[in-house]
């Protein structure tokens, strides 16, 4: 099997008969088994994937195959696929089989993509290291002693380990982009409302967004053309498919905003600082206009984000009570409140319980105005500030993460240290803007650095185009 570059090149081989979809699926199943020690896949959909591959091979012979024929996709374990288990990597949903498919899954299948399996993640997408999973941590394929990031760390690890062509993750505050940075791949968070959330197990509904991860921006673009667009099942999905496809030709010289508070942040690792400075130098030499902006509100982003997301989580996760589905404890008693208490106490992990309690606290009487209301005001200020910056600049450029990948179990003593992993990524979730992490310079194979671009709302394709320009010419 030749090294994979992008779907366009792969399809040339498939349509010329050099390889078929069944062989592709068998190849990935074999690789997943070989890389089992990394704990990336929770389940491989072997029978379903092979059955699909046989049907698609027939379509290819009949010249009726969809646009994504041959694309092998892994999905985060919080995206529903009808007839298959989904657990959000939590004990509380152990054994639960979805009765419907997420809209993104239906759209991918309609274009003949093949879903290979479900991928490990932080429980209910809560975490920055992929160590909060009920099924154990995912190890970074670049160095198995390091974290791949989180919460979509398994999705990023699957790409760098060559276990699928593209993976679908979810991004609430950087959960696609930070793992992409840690695994030296590309991670894309679309504009909020560009991709349907129907069938995504919710963490914080006004922040969550499904997005693709891969090694090729061309692949991410092709997947986005398929999964974007309005959905009757998701009223927050407001952009038409045509909104994604519209692309104005970008100017040769781009106006780029660099937020000084980020590029000079005290948490920046020396390699991140050095790599980011080198990228800026290359962009300036290429004639692009670099503008520095100050954004003092940056220091309030993480506190505001965690207040708002935990508040939404405390509401969203109230449905997991052990009565309707999933894990249940204490069924022998007739006391329903005892069943719920025991189920939630034993079914949820430590981090999920911490966030539910924090969210319940900030919404409680006497604290709502002090915390939740103020956080909402900060969110509005972030939206206004981001819009203001993007009126005079084409893109905002900043590091994806303040650090390079760190060791598993390294930062467990203080969870707030891990929360600060999101210091540069939460802006795009608070504002709803599209954002992408791309690999930039690195000084060791297991110490990659990601650069992050934030674009204008609804201008996702332009953002991908410039991200590709940076990858081809400036890193």
Image (cartoon, helix red, strand yellow):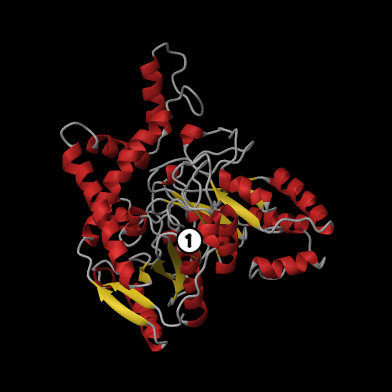
Q: Quadrant of the N terminus?
A: bottom right
Residue nearer the viewer, 287 or 27: 287
Which residue shows up at 38% across the image and 30% down it?
318
Q: Looking at the image, how many numbered discs can be counted on the residues? A: 1
Q: Is residue 385 above or below residue 320?
A: below
Q: Residue at x 53, y 55 (%)?
A: 155
Q: Quadrant of residue 352?
A: top left
- Classify residue 391 as left or right of residue 266: right
The image quadrant that residue 35 belongs to is: bottom right
Image location of residue 397, percent across then percent down: 36, 71
Residue at 69%, 59% (x, y): give it.
67
Q: What SS does tag 1 mark?
A: strand
Circle 1 residues within 10 Å: few <14, some 14–19, many ≥20:
many
Q: Is residue 330 visible?
A: yes
Q: Residue 218: percent from the left, percent from the top?
A: 58, 68
Q: Position of residue 226 (x, y in %)?
A: 60, 55
Can you identify the residue that label 1 sits on?
Answer: 188
Residues 451 and 435: in front is: 435
Is residue 358 placed above or below 466 in the rendered structure?
A: above
Residue 38 seen from this side: no
In the displayed structure, would residue 263 be above or below residue 321?
A: below
Measured as percent of width and height from the top left, residue 418 is found at: 32, 54
Q: Is residue 215 left or right of residue 291?
A: right
The one of 33 and 430 positioned closer to us in this rendering? 430
Query: Looking at the image, which residue is at 81% across and 59% down?
Result: 63
């Amino acid at each position: 099997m030749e090294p994979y570059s992008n779907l366009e090149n792969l399809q040339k081989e498939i349509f010329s008969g050099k390889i078929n979809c069944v062989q592709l699926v068998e190849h990935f199943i074999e690789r997943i088994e070989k890389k089992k020690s990394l704990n990336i896949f929770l389940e491989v959909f072997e029978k379903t994937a092979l059955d699909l591959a046989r049907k698609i091979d027939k379509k290819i012979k009949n010249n009726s195959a969809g646009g994504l024929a041959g694309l092998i996709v892994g999905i985060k374990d919080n995206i529903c696929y009808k007839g298959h288990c989904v657990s959000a990597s939590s004990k509380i949903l152990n054994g639960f089989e979805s009765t419907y498919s997420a809209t993104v899954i239906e759209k991918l299948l309609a274009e003949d993509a093949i879903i290979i399996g479900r991928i490990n993640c932080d429980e209910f997408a809560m975490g920055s290291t992929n160590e909060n999973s009920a099924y154990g941590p995912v190890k970074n394929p670049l160095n198995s002693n390091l974290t791949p990031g989180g919460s979509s760390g398994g999705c990023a690890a699957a790409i760098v380990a060559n276990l699928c062509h593209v993976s679908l993750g979810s991004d609430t505050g950087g959960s696609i982009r930070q793992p992409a940075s840690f695994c030296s791949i590309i991670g894309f968070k679309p504009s909020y409302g560009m991709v349907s959330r129907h069938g995504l197990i919710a963490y914080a509904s006004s922040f969550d967004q499904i997005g693709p991860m891969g090694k090729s921006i061309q692949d991410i673009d092709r997947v986005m053309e398929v999964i974007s667009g309005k959905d009757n099942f998701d009223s927050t999905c407001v952009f038409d498919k045509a909104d994604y496809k519209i692309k104005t030709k970008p100017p040769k010289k781009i106006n780029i905003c660099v937020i000084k508070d980020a590029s000079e942040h005290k948490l920046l690792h020396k390699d991140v600082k050095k790599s980011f400075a080198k990228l800026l130098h290359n962009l300036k030499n290429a004639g692009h206009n670099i503008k520095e902006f100050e954004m003092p509100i940056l220091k309030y982003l993480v506190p505001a984000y965690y207040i708002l997301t935990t508040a939404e989580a405390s509401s969203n996760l109230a449905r997991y009570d052990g009565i309707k589905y999933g894990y249940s404890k204490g069924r022998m008693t007739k006391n329903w409140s005892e069943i719920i208490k025991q189920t939630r106490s034993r079914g949820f992990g430590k981090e999920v319980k911490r966030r539910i309690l924090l969210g319940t606290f900030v919404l409680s009487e006497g604290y709502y105005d002090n915390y939740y209301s103020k956080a909402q005001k900060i969110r509005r200020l972030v939206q206004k500030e981001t819009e203001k910056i993007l009126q005079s600049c084409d893109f905002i450029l900043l590091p994806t993460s303040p650090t390079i990948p760190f060791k598993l179990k390294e930062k467990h003593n203080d969870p707030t240290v891990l929360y600060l992993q999101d210091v540069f990524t939460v802006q795009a979730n608070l504002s709803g803007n599209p954002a992408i992490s791309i690999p930039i310079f690195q000084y060791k194979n297991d110490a990659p650095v990601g650069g992050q671009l934030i674009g204008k709302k609804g201008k996702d394709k332009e953002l991908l185009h410039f991200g590709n320009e940076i990858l081809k010419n400036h890193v």
